[in-house]
Image (cartoon, grey):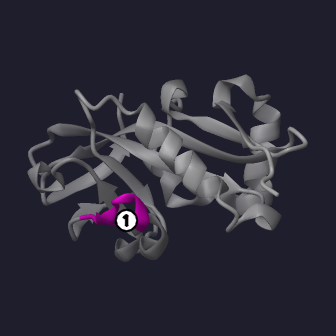
Amino acid sequence: MNATRTLIPLDAVDPAMVEELLDVVFGPERHARTAYAIREGTDWLPALSFAALDEDERLAGTIQAWPVALADPKGRNHPLIMVGPVAILPELQGTGYGRMLMAAQASALDPAAPLPQVLIGDAPYYGKFGFTQAPRGWRCPGPWEPERLLVRGADPAVLPQEGVLGPWH
């Protein structure tokens, strides 16, 4: 029997519930992670951020998108969308919620003007969604593992091979 799952805009969810879910999935120390430094001072993009509810209408997972940029060595900013966090309740991980949220976000991107997406995550999982390792010349603020910095786009080769990720203002 298939459980009923509901996908809703993330801005329809009480922000305190989202924070609680993120604490459960990533821990309260999550704010010290590099991804938070990259998107510091920006607001998530409502049109690309979603929540999944389980059959009891309980918040089961979320996905967010953030405006960020890659500053090349000449100081030019190349806009990107940072995906994440993708957060699924631990007891529901591996049951399709992550795939559903990733598909919702990908389908919400405007095909006429697709911006490349970037995330910090596990390549074997996110590779299923078209993410590949970012160029080795990309840098992030704070500690990070280069093999976990991933990019997806129509043609990631058009992006600079060197640069520093940070917020888009």
Q: Is 140 part of what is drawn in magenta?
A: no
- Decide: is 69 above or below 126: above
Out of 84 and 162, give the one closest to the viewer.
84
Quadrant location of residue 79? top left
Magenta-colored span:
128-134
Quadrant location of residue 109? top left
Query: Could you say where residue 78 lies in the image, as x and y percent from the top left?
Result: 20, 39
Q: Amino acid at mark 1?
A: Leu
The reply to whether residue 27 is visible in this rendering is no
Quadrant where the C terminus is found in the figure: top left
Task: Identify the residue under disc 1.
Answer: 149
Out of 90 and 52, give the one closest to the viewer.
52
Residue at (82% x, 66% y) in the render: 91
Is disc 1 placed on a helix, strand or loop? strand
Q: Is residue 53 left or right of residue 119?
A: right
Out of 9 and 158, give the one closest to the viewer.
9
Q: Is residue 147 left or right of residue 39?
A: left
Residue at (74% x, 60% y) in the render: 25
